[in-house]
């Protein structure tokens, strides 16, 4: 069993069996991203810092506690614009307005007043299938 480890830059590197296959930068697709299924349909995505900088349009910065994004996945495309607007009204700075993505989804980025990077994303290929439609706790 492989373990994740820290690279010399302090980033967590996933073992090869957990990385997505490397893709050409010319297609603007990520070279490495790993998705982990959590409970209640929640997914954790870990991106390579170069790919995150490229996708968000921000300049890569030295490693810090803010060199990651917090992704909020929504179940309907229209929710992306709604959440982005709610964030703007609450003082967030829109970094990248919502737009079509290379994977057929729709997403945008903002930074909250503390400088944390958020991605609001609708990804039709990553929607959780819920058979129990009762409200989540």
Image (cartoon, rainbow, N blue to C red):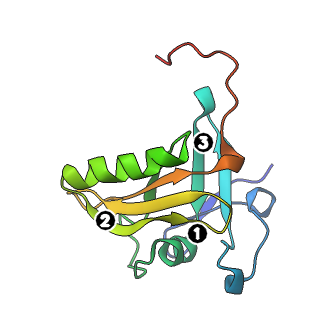
Q: Is residue 78 left or right of residue 5?
A: left
Helix, strand, or loop for circle 3?
Answer: strand
**Dot 3 and dot 2 residues touching (CB under 8 Å):** no
- Tell which of 73 and 114 is nearer to you: 73
Q: Viewer-nearest of labels 3 and 2?
A: 2
Please identify the quarter of the rendering in which residue 94 is found: bottom left
Please identify the quarter of the rendering in which residue 128 is found: top right
Q: Earlier in the sequence, mark 2 or mark 1?
A: 1
**What residue would you read off at disc 1?**
48
Check the image and report above or below for 60 versus 15. Answer: below
Helix, strand, or loop for circle 1?
Answer: loop
Give the total number of marks visible in the rendering: 3
Q: Tag on residue 94?
A: 2
> Where's residue 46, x and y in %?
58, 57
Determine the CA span between mark 2 and mark 1: 22 Å
**What residue would you read off at disc 3?**
43
Helix, strand, or loop for circle 2?
Answer: strand
Q: Earlier in the sequence, mark 3 or mark 2?
A: 3
Determine crowd level at label 3: few under 14, some 14-19, many 20+ residues with C-alpha closer than 10 A: some
For image coordinates 57% across by 71% down, the residue present is: 7
Q: Residue furthest front?
A: 78
For image coordinates 50% across by 16% down, the residue present is: 135
Q: Is residue 35 left or right of residue 7?
A: right
Q: Is residue 121 left or right of residue 89?
A: right
Determine the CA span between mark 3 and mark 2: 23 Å
Q: Viewer-nearest of labels 2 and 1?
A: 2
Determine crowd level at label 1: few under 14, some 14-19, many 20+ residues with C-alpha closer than 10 A: some
> Where's residue 20, x and y in %?
75, 63
Q: Is residue 106 left or right of residue 63?
A: right
Please identify the quarter of the rendering in which residue 37 is found: top right
> Where's residue 51, x and y in %?
57, 74
């Amino acid at each position: 069993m492989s373990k994740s480890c820290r690279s010399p830059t302090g980033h967590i590197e996933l073992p090869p069996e957990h990385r997505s296959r490397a893709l050409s930068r010319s297609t603007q697709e990520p070279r490495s991203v790993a998705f982990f299924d959590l409970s209640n349909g929640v997914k954790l995505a870990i991106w390579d810092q170069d790919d995150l900088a490229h996708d968000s349009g921000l300049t890569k910065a030295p490693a810090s506690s803010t060199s990651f994004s917090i992704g909020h996945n929504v179940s309907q495309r229209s929710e992306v614009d709604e959440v982005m607007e709610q964030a703007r009204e609450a003082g967030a700075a829109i970094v990248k307005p919502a737009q079509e993505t290379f994977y057929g989804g729709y997403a945008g980025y903002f930074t909250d007043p503390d400088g944390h990077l958020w991605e609001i994303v609708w990804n039709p290929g990553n929607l959780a299938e819920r058979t129990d439609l009762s409200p989540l706790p």
